Amino acid sequence: MARTARIALNRPLRRLFDYRVPEGMDLACGQRVTIPFGRTTATGLVAALDAPPPEGITLKAIQGCCEDWQALPEETFRLLSWASDYYQHPLGECLFTALPPALRRGQPAKARTEAYWKATGSPDNLAANATKQRALLAWLAQYPEGAATRRITQAGFSSAQIRTLRDRNLIVEADPPQAELDSEPTTDGPHLSDAQSQAAAQLPKPADGFSTSLLYGITGSGKTEIYLDYLKQHLSPTDQALVLVPEINLTPQTVARFERYFGARVAVWHSALNDAQRLDAWLKVRNGDPVILIGTRSAVLLPFTRLRTIIVDEEHDSSFKQGEGFRYSGRDTAVYRGHLNDCPVILGSATPSLESIHNAQTGKYTLIKLEERAGKSRPPTIKLLDIRSRPLQAGLSRPTLDAIRRTLDSGRQVLVYVNRRGFAPVMMCFDCGHMVECPRCDTRLTYHRRDRAMRCHHCDYQVAATEICPKCESDAFKPVGQGTERAEDFLAEQFPETPIVRVDRDSTQRKGSIQSILKQVNSGSPCILVGTQMLAKGHDFPGVTLVVVINADGGLFSVDFRAPEQLIQTLIQVSGRAGRGEHPGDVLVQTCHSDHPLLQSLAQGDYLPVADQLLAERETGALPPFRAMAIFRAEADTMENSLKILDRIKPLARGDRLEIWGPLPALIARRADRHRAQLVLLCDQRKHLNRTLTGICQVLDETRLPGGLKWMIDVDPQETG
Ligand code: ADP
Ligand code: ZN
Ligand code: ZN
């Protein structure tokens, strides 16, 4: 009997396509093929072999294999199939997420390794006016082993000049230098402290098989040093390791720290790589090269073949959850991968997610504590400053300003955390009460003084800022609330001698990397850093001894059940930037609710008791992690259409084991002129919830929906607004 294959395509379709396997073609699951599709050809992945073909249909034949090996080897294929089912996302799109863009488009799986060039000829053969070409030849002569194209272009020469010299046989391609793949460290890091060694000793070894450890290490306790030491001690020279980090942590500094220990064994994977770099990294992983891959979320999906250790740093970070399309959690997928792969998974954080703490409390994870700072630094002291009856200037109280002044006078640095970029969250008319809203969303426009613009932070709408009220033309038209620009301006007035460094999405977009902005800070001389949560993440600012939180109250009373957890995590992370050097740090948290129990226990300085308090609230509310949650979201041209589809879904979910909230309009009900609604499902049993979701998807796939209506499922949602 002729063989058949089910092919997955990179389309948002919950179905596979049947094809005939031509005589003599050898196929395996996970292999890339080209198939006739409609009037064109498409690149697909073999998802199943010899499933019974549909009756009475003559199948088209597969055109060819892209390579004679599986782009997705078995374990990776199983991981993605699991994720497709768990997150209820079409298998085809899940599988293709694990391919680099070039392979998704059907290009060959060949490394476009950079060419190396060395000089062979003499400049005498060049025309006298070919100065640039002469210069290139002379430059290349310094590198008898050859130099990479990238280095040549970085030195100011062009690819055209390289080609010309090649065509004249004055330079030839050289062999790329052999990467040193043994793990001989070039320099030794600091000796682990006793506390670090004790924590490190509790971590299971690759040979122990699968387990998940939660490394709770306070800010500045030296977790990264533990990871480095662990890999150095336990990862064999032929094995692979994965280190997942939030996007913002993938700074040159982090990579450099790993490279110092592991040299060319270190590879990176993040959104700023170009297609060729992605293909190169992907091929190394797939070929089984003994890489230590430092990567963001999607690195967990790559086709490792010898993966023996998985580390997830800052495991609480919400950037590990994909917010659109295939909404997987990189952290949770990492844990499942460790299980498939039978290797240890280490989750590290100073503020672990409530999910992970719960898993530690129920015995699924092993909790390892590291409650001392590394080196000489001490944990900071956190003080609540009630601002209810205090006059504020640009959101800052008198005692806060005094503390800033004292810190600067003693030659140290200050960090001011503001949770909003721009100048002010809204412009308001004090005559008619008008507030400027986004015409496309149910939100207000943020005032950006630097660009004289009012901008929506939820869509790309913006208008020029006006001096008078657009409604009544009064000039009592004023910014209300605090943004980073306003704090920056005010502090610049108050401390004219002190450099102010603003770090937020706007300033980093304008001035390039956060690294270059932070040069000033790294110099150690007095300055004030003003910024958003970008500043909270993983940075080491040894000169900062005072951290000011302008307003801690945003997350205390939010409708989103995760808001208090995120608030506390941000406050502890940002506080953790203080006193990392020799001098102790202080944190001043301005609040109107200094008697709030969460803030009270935060001021004690320890995260775990606060987390217990938050977990108790979750348990009372029967919220995650005590029940599994999924959200159906719908968006359409009218709210009516969005609600209608969710109303249709609701009866399909009914049953005594499920609790259903909604359908209700989303917190921002209209966004970029789309009307959004949601239906929340909660269940004691994840399996039951998963089966229900599968059933609903089947029904929806067979239903004709009004044009413009989109629906999506978010399993284990990070945002519930
Ligand atoms: P974390 O990741 O826990 O925030 P890091 O690993 O970045 O901490 O370490 C914080 C700082 O302490 C870094 O500057 C690091 O070089 C330093 N450090 C870590 N371990 C030691 C040690 N054993 N001795 C001295 N300094 C250390
Ligand atoms: Zn007005
Ligand atoms: Zn908008």
Image: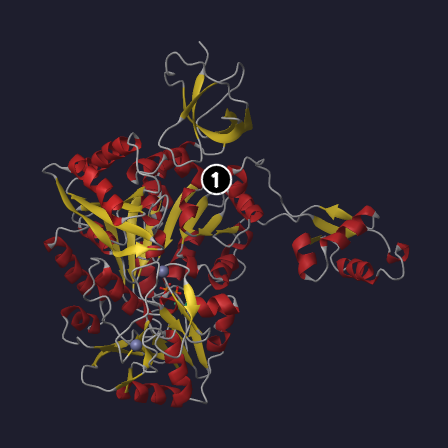
Q: Quadrant of the C terminus?
A: bottom left
294 in relation to 603, above or below: above
Comparing 526 with 452, the one in front is 452
Residue 582 x, y percent position in the rendering = 38, 79
Tell me: 64 left or right of 468: right
Question: Which quadrant would the N terminus be assigned to in this image?
Answer: top left
Residue 49: quarter of image:
top left
Q: Is residue 594 left or right of residue 371?
A: left
Q: Can I make out residue 306 in this image?
A: no
Residue at point 25%, 78% (across, down): 590
Which residue is at 35% across, 51% downward?
323
Q: Is residue 119 above or below residue 498?
A: above
- Colouring mode (rainbow / by chain / secondary structure / one colour): secondary structure
Q: Quarter for ligand 3?
A: bottom left
Residue found farthest to the top: 1
Q: Amino acid at mark 1?
A: Leu
Relative to the observer, which residue lies in front, 475 or 454? 475
In the rendered view, tell whether residue 455 sits above or below residue 618. below
Residue at x 25%, y 72% (from the top left corner): 552
Q: Is residue 143 left or right of residue 328?
A: right
Q: Is residue 444 above or below residue 17?
A: below
Q: Is mark 1 within 8 Å of ligand 1?
A: no
Q: Visible in this render: residue 310?
A: yes
Q: Residues within 10 Å of mark 1 (few under 14, many from 20)?
A: many
424 to the left or right of 591 = right
Q: Nearer the viewer, residue 427 or 174?
A: 427
Q: Which residue is mark 1?
A: 99
Estimate the x, y position of residue 255 in percent, counting from the top left.
Answer: 49, 59
Q: State the image coordinates of residue 449 (x, y, percent, origin top left).
A: 42, 76
Q: Helix, strand or loop at disc 1?
A: loop
In front of the other: 7 or 290: 7
In the rendering, at what x and y percent does residue 214 appear?
A: 28, 54
